[in-house]
Amino acid sequence: MINHVTVKVKDFEKEEAFYEAALAPLGYGKGPAFPGVQAFVAKDGSAVWVSTAADGDAVSPIHVAFQAADDDAVKAFYEAGLANGGTDNGEPGPRPNYGPTYYAAFVHDPEGNNIEAMLV
């Protein structure tokens, strides 16, 4: 089980707004914060930390998939992500090539990270 993941970003304010909106339908809310750092925490204690990359640090896009409660949460994640600076990387729908019951949506955050909400 993963306890937390950190996403290093260049534009902290834009990314913070994106993650706050996109992760809310998946049960994440604002947690601890420090200058240039914001945690989004779920009821199970898992967290996503959005952190400003240090000057000179290369920021490489990552892929993170979040388990959703149901199809509606996947759709809400997708819509919130697009409404908050994300771009489409796969509309909500079945992904039979990933598994017979796999349902997911993919959004690139404003800096190109591939963020997914899914059900199995």
Image (tube, rainbow, N blue to C red):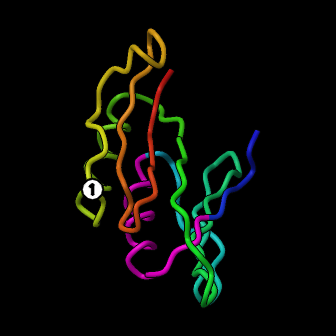
- The residues colored magenta run 7-25
Residue 35 lies left or right of residue 110; in this view the side is: right
Check the image and report above or below for 113 versus 27.
Answer: below
Residue 103 locus on image (x, y percent): 39, 24
**Callout 1 secondary element:** strand
Helix, strand or loop for the magenta stretch, by majority: helix
Residue 47 locus on image (x, y percent): 65, 57
Residue drawn 35% across the image and 28% down it? 71
Instruction: Identify the residue position indicated by label 1 in the image.
Output: 87
Amino acid type indicated by mark 1: Thr
**Res. 104 image quadrant:** top left
Q: From the viewer's side, name the closer residue of 55 and 106.
A: 55
Check the image and report above or below for 14 versus 118.
Answer: below
Residue 90 lies left or right of residue 29; in this view the side is: left
Check the image and report above or below for 117 versus 14.
Answer: above
Q: Quadrant of the N terminus?
A: top right
Badge 1 density bin: few <14, some 14–19, many ≥20, Cα 10 Å: some
Check the image and report above or below for 39 versus 5.
Answer: below
Residue 41 locus on image (x, y percent): 62, 58
Residue 42 locus on image (x, y percent): 61, 52
Residue 54 lies left or right of residue 13; in this view the side is: right
Q: From the viewer's side, name the closer residue of 55 and 11.
A: 55
Residue drawn 25% across the image and 56% down it? 82
Give the farthest residue toward the top. 100
Q: From the viewer's side, name the closer residue of 104 and 111.
A: 111
